[in-house]
Image (cartoon, rainbow, N blue to C red):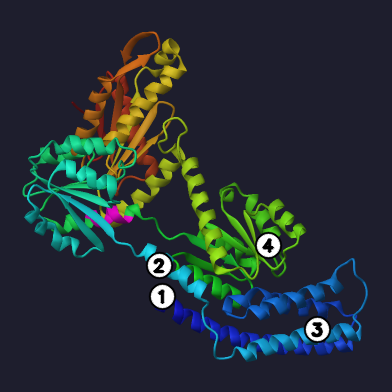
Amino acid sequence: MQAWQSSFKEIQEQYLKNSRERVSNLIELLSLVNQDPENYQILKKLAHHFHVLAGSGTMYGFPKVSQLGLDGEKFCEQYTSKSYSTSLKPIDTEKLKEIINGIVASFENSAGTTQTTPDTLNIIGNTQKKLASKSTILFVCDNPEESILIREPLSKLPCDLLISTTLNHALNELRKTKVSAMIIKLPHISGDVYDFVEKIRSNETLKDLPVLFVSDRAEFLDKVRSIHCGADGHFDFSLNQQAFTNRLLHLLKKQSRDPYKILSVEDDIDQAAFIRVFLESVGYQVKTCPHPKDFENTLSSFQPDLVLLDVNLPEVNGYELAKYLRQDERYATLPILFLTTESKLEARVESALSGADDHLVKPVPPALLLSSVSAKLERSSFLKSLLQKDALTQLLNHSALMEFAKKLISKANRNNLPLVLVMFDLDFMKLVNEKYGFTTGDRVLNNLANLLKKRIRQSDVVARYGLDEFAIIAEGINLEEALALSNRIVKEFAAIKQSVANQPGFFVTVSAGISLFDQNNMNLVKWFECANQALKIAKTSGRNQVIVYDSNKSNLSLFS
């Protein structure tokens, strides 16, 4: 809140300075109008200055200035419109003088007393409270005193700690409390923790919950079992607390997305400053583009999640920029909001025809601006998630997988993390579709998709790669661990009895190919090619098995 107050005071002082210059320009232009009442270019300049004051006055605590600015803008526009050809009369210039004097008086009467409106303070305060909420970590252990083991590493994170001594109690906590991550201390004597985690992974509301195991001693088979059940890591606490803390922090960050990015296309520096400071104070990242000539480059480099457009811009208006955006399929779902003093029905129709999502009339109350921006961003995010998903299985689709893969490769290169790709392909699916029909074939695809979702960790990426192909990208595990996980999936799927109406059930197998990303010898394309080569060998050498591509030996190795 103090940061907002300080920033607002700074931009408000600049606004008052700019407004004094703007009022001087208004007085000078009025004098020119008196000398040449038929010069419409002077009137257009007057209208522009009034337009700026109309949009910015209320933002900075001068609602009367906004009203008078709007009156002046409309008054000038009636003489500059094509349907109105009469020149100004002395009585008209007196009207303009009255409006300008009213603006001067509004500034003078409020000098030294202006401050942020209470509504704006409440909006910022409430939003910042939501953003500042701590993570809640659930620690499951038989002995509550053992919580001292994780209190020290957790003290470095902004989080609260809950403790459960039984799995049933932990499940109740998960149902009633919004838990950010769960840590389970092994050995745990009051139930099968691996089965417990598997059930969590199959629960729609808990399936993305980060789960970590910690123990005094972690053997290889313990780590494999942890991966099998869907845990995000298993740490030997006596050896490496820092690795545990880093992993937990990574998982918590992954739950919270980066701030939404907003591009504000606004040529008035005062309105642009308020929009930037206000939206940044509630957690958004804002970039200002003051001139349309810079719009394309700024759009490409900044990659915004939403665009705020002023209608009255130099050389190119906001409607034309919106139409330009909508012609590019990359920005088909990008929300566009107009901020303008034009409230007429024609302006709203023009906004809709240009592809805008909303039309807000200046001066825009901060609450309305924030609610509209928030709603459009949430809807856009939802639409993007739908576009990223395969309609049948609800897994990521091919395009989304490749985008995630690029990001994970970049991260692996920076942090030197192991990164594994596993490609799965259903065996003899053409025969299944021919014999039992495509509806049954779709059910088989969904059965594999559900098994993959059940077996992967919260940090892994799973997608439908092609018609009968699926892919998993797992970071932080080596080939042995990936092989153990893949073999279990292959064996478990082969044991699933596929159902078909009015006929005996049948069984389907799946083959898999694994490739460990080699930073020195692979790029994205090569990585997927290697996994597909391994998968092809698995298919041609008997199916229902896993093949690992060995990048060190530049050949393929069969593991059983």
Seen at 59% across and 46% down, the residue is 329
* Image mark for residue 96: 3
Distance from disc 3 to disc 1, alpha carbons, whole Å, reads: 40 Å
Question: Which of disc 2 and disc 4 is earlier in sequence?
Answer: 2
Residue 174 coordinates in the image, percent (x, y)? 26, 46
- Alpha carbon separation for disc pair 3 and 4: 28 Å
Q: Secondary structure at mark 2?
A: helix
Along the viewing direction, whichever of 24 and 145 lies nearer the viewer: 145
Examine the image and state in which quarter residue 541 appears. Answer: top left
The answer to whether residue 281 of the structure is visible from this angle is no
Q: Which numbered mark, 3 or 4, is in the foreground of this view?
A: 3
Please tell me which of labels 3 and 1 falls first in the chain: 1
Q: Is residue 349 visible?
A: yes
Q: Is residue 279 left or right of residue 552?
A: right
352 above or below 485? below
Q: Which residue is mark 4?
A: 318
Q: Where in the figure is residue 132, as x and y percent of width and height?
A: 35, 65
Asked whether disc 1 touches disc 2, contact meaning CB atoms under 8 Å apart, the reply is yes
Query: For the residue carrying disc 3, how many other residues have a C-alpha within 10 Å: few (<14), some (14-19), or many (20+)?
Result: many
Q: CA distance from mark 1 to mark 4?
A: 33 Å
Whether tag 3 and tag 2 are in contact, CB under 8 A, the answer is: no
Q: Quadrant of residue 550?
A: top left
- Report the amino acid beneath label 1: Met
Q: Quadrant of the C terminus?
A: top left
Secondary element at tag 1: loop
| Crowding near the residue tagged with mark 1, few <14, some 14–19, many ≥20 C-alpha atoms within 10 Å | few
Q: Which residue is mark 2?
A: 128
Rendering quarter of residue 162: bottom left
Residue under label 1 = 1
**In front: label 4 or label 2:** 2
Instruction: From the top left corner, tell me how far across and down residue 217 is, in percent.
Output: 6, 47
Residue type (three-letter) at the residue carrying disc 2: Gln
